[in-house]
Image (tube, helix red, strand yellow):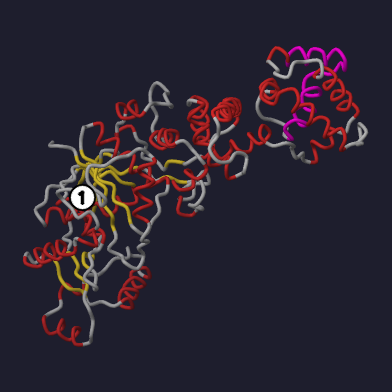
Amino acid sequence: MGRVRVRFAQSQSEHLHVGNARVALCNYIFAKKFDGDFVIRIEDTDQDRNVEEAIDELISDLRWFNIDWNEGPNIGGIYGPYRQSLRNKLYQEKLNELIDKGLVYPCYCTKDDLEQQRNLALSRGQVSRYDNRCRFLDEVQKLQYENEGRRPVWRFKVEPQHLTIYDLIRGEITFDTGLMGDFIIMKADQTPAPLFSVTVDDAVMKITHVIRTEDHLSNTPRHVLLFKALDYEIPQFAHMALLQGVDNEPLCRHDLRDYYSVEGLRKKGYLPEAVINYLVNIGISLEDGSEVMSFDELVARFDLGDMSKSAATFDVDKLNWYAGYYIRNAEPARIADLSMAYLKEKQMVEGNLTEDAFEYLIRVVDVIRHNVTCLSEIADYAAVFFQESVEMDSESTRMIRTEESKKILFALVELLEKMDEKLTHDDFHFIIKELYAKTALRGSQLYQPIRRVLTGKSHGPELDDIFVLLGKQRIIQRITTVMKKYEYIDNS
């Protein structure tokens, strides 16, 4: 085997969802493992479905994953261009080569003709496929159709045989080509059918391994027939299991603007290394049970033979497990810097922070990152450290208005007034000990009223961290505001 060359082919009509991203990552890692080339190709021959900004979005999404490529539409390469819409001359040349070999023929069947053939086959309980009728047209019949204004497609002649391929994930697979029928390689508008353009491009671009999802498996024998007809070297194939949601439905039936799109994950503020680690590990069981790995470890341990043949599930809860791990173990300063955009959106911070203000933000992030899975969630937990007051839900309001809470809050203010402004963790534990002595309350009965009056939430960062970050005066101010609101003290 020569130099490994793999490709990621993306339609210009599609945005990058997590299933596509998984394919791109596995191809990229495979190339890295063998010190090979990773090629990006855009399949944009269907002009009616193309989305102009899709290429820029694709490049941006791949860059977010820290993926780089050796050849592609934005950097060129010796086998370019890398947009199929710019390669039509090549496809026409290869069609002419097949015409000269007598391996293709023009087909004049209309949509109605094909529908009738399909319905007839189904009514007889047969496999629905093209019946090859136009293969046997004489020149008179062809001319008659031409005079009627029919524009033909070109079909490849499929001879019955048992065709065996070896798949690097699924092993040996045998196809009965007699069930396929002659297939279209060039449309009536002179644009290539995808399986034809993909075959030609893979061959001309010297692709050695085609790593893609199992929905392309049924087309593999067609590709192989074309490779052979054009005297091309056949690459090795590997068909990965498709990703599906936890409801066992294909990703295409889910909202791809949310967790199932790379754009959605980016907007939510997932760390790219968490998404990479999760996507690459889906459907792979390692003997030592390893899950969290560096990128170099992922490359070193990647083996197509380890991948499951069964449909793989994209589980948001599992993604969040990875995401939480990476946020907890990242440098607090990095997380603080990345979270700035979300904090500014919620108007918690503005402009360029002073050194002291950024240092405070780092301390806040260091405390709350244990409660979040993505950067957008940081703003929800950070609010209590930047806002003057907090909003409490009905449950918190009910709890704060009890006699036990009133007793706790009065005692807490009394204790705080005797403390230094800059509270420490030791100060907090002293206060809790004293509150227990004064109220005889402990556990959630003691902690929950304090947490809710300071944060408005039933859970979140540790209370001792909240005390240290808020400081004496801000804590007293929040408690006093609540006391006045519920008339525990005089509002005057």
Magenta stretch: dominant secondary structure: helix
Q: Which residue occupies 83% across, 34% down?
A: 482
Q: In this orientation, which residue lies closer to the viewer: 146 or 328?
A: 328
Q: Eyeballing the image, is 376 above or below 155? A: above
Q: Residue 112: image x %, image y %?
A: 33, 78
Q: Is residue 453 magenta?
A: yes
Which sits in the foreground, 329 or 43?
329
Say which residue appears at 89% left-offset and 31% top-offset: 402
> Considering the numbered disc 1 on the image, is that residue within a helix, a strand or a loop?
loop
Query: In the picture, residue 485 is in which quadrant?
Result: top right
Query: In this view, which residue lies farthest toward the left?
Result: 100
Residue at image position (69%, 20%) is 464
- At label 1, the amino acid type is Gly
For the magenta stretch, what is the residue range? 428-456
Figure label count: 1
Q: Up-down: is 364 above or below 441?
A: below
* Residue at the spot of label 1: 76
